[in-house]
């Protein structure tokens, strides 16, 4: 009783202790006042995710720590900070869901889940898997086919993650390829390819950032032309795509991925024992009557892709025509299907809404086909579609929490603090490397590549111009370092949308996916810095540097990797 009374008195006293960072301290931003404290929310979320294996709890506590810090920094005492910090969590979640882009992504994920369920239940997924299995004679060809499908769906990383996984999962399972490896191949062909594709949902944003950054230094440039010039400097994207092909062809793995592949080979456990999935695969059973046809899958998926392209064009066209960019409007009117028009309209479109609409149309097509072919009744088809959406409900929860965490970090200025670590006395040759590393850290900690690009691009181009005036290649290289560093986090962070969706599409546990692919991402990032940005910053031609990077990646795979043929009872070396 005495101990309880002591605790009660202590809490009462603490509740009247004012914050050491009072609201009166209005000078400077939140980041400048809090400093390294702004890093606590992402560190809490990431550390707890690995320790507890519970992503939802970890994200929630990461947000909670951030709201408490924000309250405390605003002048609240500890007790009221905890109380109001808890209520602030609801506000962040509601604001995340109220954002049209986020709402579109949630709807897109749910509807594509329903589409996958209809395709699976009609037997279309099994039929296409059996057709692919005839081409996939072993783990090598299976992984290369998965990689190729990822390249084909280049226009959007979300669509890539949600489509390729369910198609290739049955084939991959048959070859005893671990779900972690499948998730890695999918993830490595999502953001890395969408970020450098000539036309994709990313391009408009990237080109816009480049244009604004050049305008800030008083230069008017062809921003798309600059974007094209950055592609050879996108070392991480290019080398990661090459790494996937190389490890798929040699079957060499290292680190946790090697253990996952050996587990799948030796014990037939495609996921780690005790691991939980972000989707419920038991819901997706085949209920089709008669012989399943690949067209039950190809037509709806084809419709998804076709209507996505149509939507990107029409939605982007409407947005541009409603703008005050007369030159671009005239270009679209004079040449409605030129490459420039396609590029600009795709970039100006609202990808989240377009993909939701396309997925809804594809779902209707899949439903009608299933009913007409007698696979299921209309009411049963609706039930299957709704059940498919339910399987991805937890994915929507994780995305909402991840966005809310990003919102908290935006208020605290986490990214601003990280940017402030950039020294004013930095040697010019280190700038692209530091930009890449800073982008990688920010994007990994925040889980957002777009936000990282938006923070760093306005800084990188003016810095590069000031440090090496007149060197256009140096400026382009620095811009490429921003875009590439940001994609590192999109590819590897446990709170990144694409990472979450890739693990879900592959049927892998999220944290197992992150744990197995992170050493690969770090290895390629290291090669990108040591044999990419540093040599080019010293003046070596990028087209000489790239082949050297390929050779180093080959050396890394053969020195660190060990062959794991999942179709063989034991590992053999060639």
Image (spheres, grey):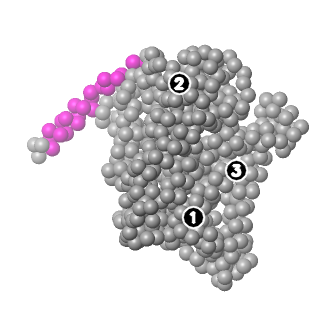
Q: Is residue 214 above or below residue 68?
A: above
* Residue linked to disc 2: 538
Give residue 420's position: percent from left, percent from top.
45, 23
Across and down, in percent, residue 179 comes to: 47, 62
Label 2 vs 1, first from the N-terminus: 1
* Mark 3 or mark 2, earlier in chain: 3
Name the residue located 72 percent from the left edge and 24 percent from the top edge. Answer: 221
Residues drawn in magenta: 4-26
Q: Is residue 114 visible?
A: no
- Give the quarter of the image for residue 386: bottom right
> Which mark sits nearer the N-terminus, 3 or 1?
1
- Residue 561 is labelled as none
**Quadrant of the frame with the C terminus:** bottom left
Indicate which label's residue lies in the foreground, 3 or 1. 1
Q: Quadrant of residue 292?
A: bottom right
Q: Is the C-beta separation of discs 3 and 2 under 8 Å?
A: no
Q: Residue at x 49, y 48 (%)?
A: 554
Q: CA distance from mark 2 to mark 1?
A: 40 Å
- Picture residue at 70% right of the left edge, 50% below the top: 354
**Which residue in the protein does label 3 denote?**
354
Q: Is residue 268 magenta?
A: no
The one of 107 and 207 positioned closer to us in this rendering: 207
Q: What's the mark number on residue 141?
A: 1
Check the image and name the residue furthest to the left: 2
């Amino acid at each position: 009783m005495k101990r309880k009374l002591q605790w009660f008195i202590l809490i009462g006293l603490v509740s009247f202790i004012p914050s050491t960072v009072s609201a009166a301290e209005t000078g400077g931003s939140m980041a400048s006042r809090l400093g390294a404290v702004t890093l606590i929310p992402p560190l809490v979320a990431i550390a707890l995710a690995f320790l507890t294996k519970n992503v939802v709890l970890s994200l929630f506590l990461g947000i909670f720590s951030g709201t408490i810090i924000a309250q405390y920094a605003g002048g609240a005492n500890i007790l009221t900070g905890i109380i109001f910090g808890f209520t602030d969590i609801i506000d962040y979640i509601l604001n995340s869901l109220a954002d049209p882009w986020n709402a579109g992504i949630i709807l897109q994920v749910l509807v594509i889940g329903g589409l996958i369920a209809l395709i699976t239940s009609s037997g279309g997924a099994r039929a296409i898997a059996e057709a692919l299995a005839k081409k996939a004679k072993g783990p090598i060809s299976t992984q290369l086919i998965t990689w190729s499908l990822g390249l084909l769906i280049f226009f959007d990383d979300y669509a890539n993650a949600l489509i390729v996984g369910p198609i290739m999962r049955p084939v991959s399972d048959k070859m005893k390829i671990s779900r972690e490896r499948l998730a890695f191949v999918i993830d490595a062909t999502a953001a890395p390819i969408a970020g450098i594709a000539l036309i994709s949902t990313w391009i408009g944003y990237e080109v816009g950032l480049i244009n604004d950054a050049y305008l800030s230094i008083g230069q008017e440039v062809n921003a798309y032309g600059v974007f094209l010039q950055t592609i050879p400097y996108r070392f991480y994207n290019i080398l990661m795509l090459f790494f996937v092909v190389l490890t798929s062809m040699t079957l060499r793995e290292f680190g946790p991925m090697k253990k996952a592949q050996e587990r799948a080979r030796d014990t037939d456990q495609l996921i780690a024992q005790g691991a939980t999935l972000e989707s419920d695969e038991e819901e997706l059973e085949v209920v089709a009557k008669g012989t399943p046809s690949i067209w039950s899958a190809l037509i709806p998926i084809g419709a998804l892709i076709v209507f996505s392209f149509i939507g990107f064009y029409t939605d982007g066209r409407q947005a541009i025509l409603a703008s005050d960019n007369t030159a671009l409007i005239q270009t679209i009117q004079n040449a409605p299907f030129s490459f420039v028009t396609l590029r600009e309209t795709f970039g100006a479109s609202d990808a989240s809404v377009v993909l939701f609409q396309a997925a809804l149309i594809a779902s209707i097509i899949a439903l009608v086909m299933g009913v007409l072919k007698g696979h299921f009744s209309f009411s049963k088809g609706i039930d299957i579609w709704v059940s498919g959406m339910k399987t991805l409900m937890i994915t929507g929860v994780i995305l909402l929490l991840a966005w809310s965490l990003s919102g908290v970090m935006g208020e605290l200025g986490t990214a601003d603090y990280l940017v402030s670590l950039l020294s004013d006395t930095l040697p010019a040759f280190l700038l692209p490397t530091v930009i890449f590393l800073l982008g990688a850290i920010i994007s990994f900690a925040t889980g957002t590549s777009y936000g990282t690009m938006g923070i760093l691009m306005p800084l990188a181009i003016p810095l590069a111009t000031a440090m090496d005036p007149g060197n256009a290649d140096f400026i382009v290289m620095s811009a490429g370092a921003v875009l590439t560093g940001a994609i590192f986090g999109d590819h590897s962070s446990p709170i990144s949308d694409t990472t979450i969706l890739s693990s879900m599409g592959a049927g892998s546990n999220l944290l197992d996916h992150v744990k197995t692919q992170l050493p690969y991402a770090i290895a390629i990032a290291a090669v990108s810095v040591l044999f990419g940005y540093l040599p080019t910053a010293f003046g070596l031609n990028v087209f000489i540097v790239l082949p050297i990077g390929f050779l180093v990646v080959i050396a890394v795979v053969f020195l660190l990797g060990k062959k794991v043929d999942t179709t063989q009872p034991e590992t053999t070396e060639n």
